[in-house]
Amino acid sequence: MSTEFHLSPDTVAATAARPERVQGAPVNPPVTLSSTYVSMGAPDGSMLYARWDTESWHPAERLIARLEGSPLPALLHASGMAAVANALHLAPAGSPVVVPRHAYHASLLLARDRARREGGEVREVDIADTEAVVEALTSEGAEAGMVWIESPTNPMLEIADVPAIVEAAHAVGALVGVDNTFATPLGQRPLEWGADIVVHSATKYLSGHSDVVLGAVVTSREDLREALREERTESGGVAGPFEAWLLLRGMRTLALRMERIWANAAELAARLAAHPLVAEVCHPSLPSHAQHERAARLMDCFGGVVTVRPVGGVAAAEDLGRHTRIWLPATSLGGVESSFERRRRFPSEAPTVPEDLLRVSVGIEDVEDLWRDLDAALRAVHA
Ligand SMILES: Cc1ncc(COP(=O)(O)O)c(C=O)c1O
């Protein structure tokens, strides 16, 4: 007789979604490389075709659902953006969508494109300003169809009061989608606050090694999951079996990686805040962060992304990558390796993001090595 007891998410990440424990079974799931399955007659729920479903997705889908607190398996997608697109698709055609003005730039572009095509409206708000969000949800008689949340936002690291926004959105019948890429399910679980949909760019922390591009959507609502599953099948933005396996492998060490990443990020943010060649540092762990208290109250982490504005402006920000030996100048985030980039190098980044802002993704390296490398590079820029 087995004894049921509550497992910590760290244990779930390492142990859940393994093959059945029977004599001779592998401890890791196999990768099934088959686009089609033997089948005859009317579909009976068994496997048919790998764009519709394949067993190679299931372990990662079950593990993400367990960590996010959903009884229904997540749905893997070909990329984070495929997942975002599918989730935004749930907003009724023509309905306004409320989005953070500093959401990931491609998500914003997508929301604006949808509005142009379908006639809805995009209401861009400061997602940390709950009153402004509520106002946007209810304004001008046209109640919003969906509110989209990033918390922390990419790249400005604003923290939303997600439970308060969920309550206000549901009061007017709007759906709530949360892009949980930055916090990971170990840092916050929006479904537990009543959010309807959670999305991940699994390319980032979930995979954790900068070697796959993948996305995931998870919801506890059967009707929404069915709509998402249908849209994924029809639009075809599905994950490859190898990528799904790499995601699962990466997630086995999620807890260890995040523990180190969060500790490194908070330590570096505190040191950078006192650095003479740094004009501004932002990280939710810092008491100077506008929503520090809110982050401490709502989240189990302060995140692994820090933003830095070096003394010397754009020229210094651009030059820094030439002087680091460990830190990589590269886009993306969430890998084991530390990296940074000047976000405004992309013309589509929001104009309210400072020109010289570096988005810094802190990795798992030794914090003293990271500090020495960054400190030396900041000094070399001004030498
Ligand atoms: C917060 C956030 N959401 C979504 C995405 C898109 O994910 P992907 O690049 O896997 O399509 C990104 C990518 O940087 C992101 O940072």
Image: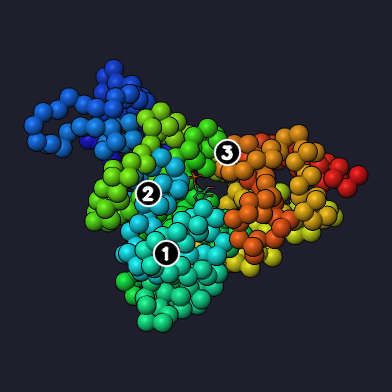
Outermost residue to the right: 383
Q: Which mark is residue 335?
A: 3
Which residue, given by chain and number where applicable, does mark 2 sit on?
Answer: 217
| Type of amino acid under label 1 | Ala
Which circle, 1 or 2, is nearer the viewer?
Answer: 1
Q: Position of residue 120 (x, y in %)?
A: 39, 68
Which residue, given by chain and number where applicable, does mark 1 sit on?
Answer: 115
As displayed, is residue 161 above or below residue 202? below
As displayed, is residue 202 above or below residue 127? above
Query: Judging from the image, what secondary structure is the residue with disc 1 in?
Result: helix
Quarter-of-image position of residue 22: top left
* Whether residue 183 is visible: no
What residue is at 29 percent from the left and 21 percent from the top? 25
Outermost residue to the front: 117
Side (left or right) of 13 relative to 221 = right
Q: Position of residue 335 (x, y in %)?
A: 57, 38
| Type of amino acid under label 3 | Gly
What's the coloring here? rainbow
Query: Judging from the image, what secondary structure is the residue with disc 2 in?
Result: strand
Marks 3 and 2 sit apart, C-alpha to C-alpha, by 20 Å
Q: Position of residue 20 (x, y in %)?
A: 27, 28
What residue is at 50 percent from the left and 77 percent from the top? 131
| Type of amino acid under label 2 | Val
Of mark 1 and mark 2, the one earlier in the sequence is 1
What residue is at 72 percent from the left and 35 percent from the top? 326
As displayed, is residue 266 above or below residue 369? below
Query: Toward the viewer: 223 or 82?
Result: 82
Query: Judging from the image, what secondary structure is the residue with disc 3 in?
Result: loop
Of mark 3 and mark 2, the one earlier in the sequence is 2
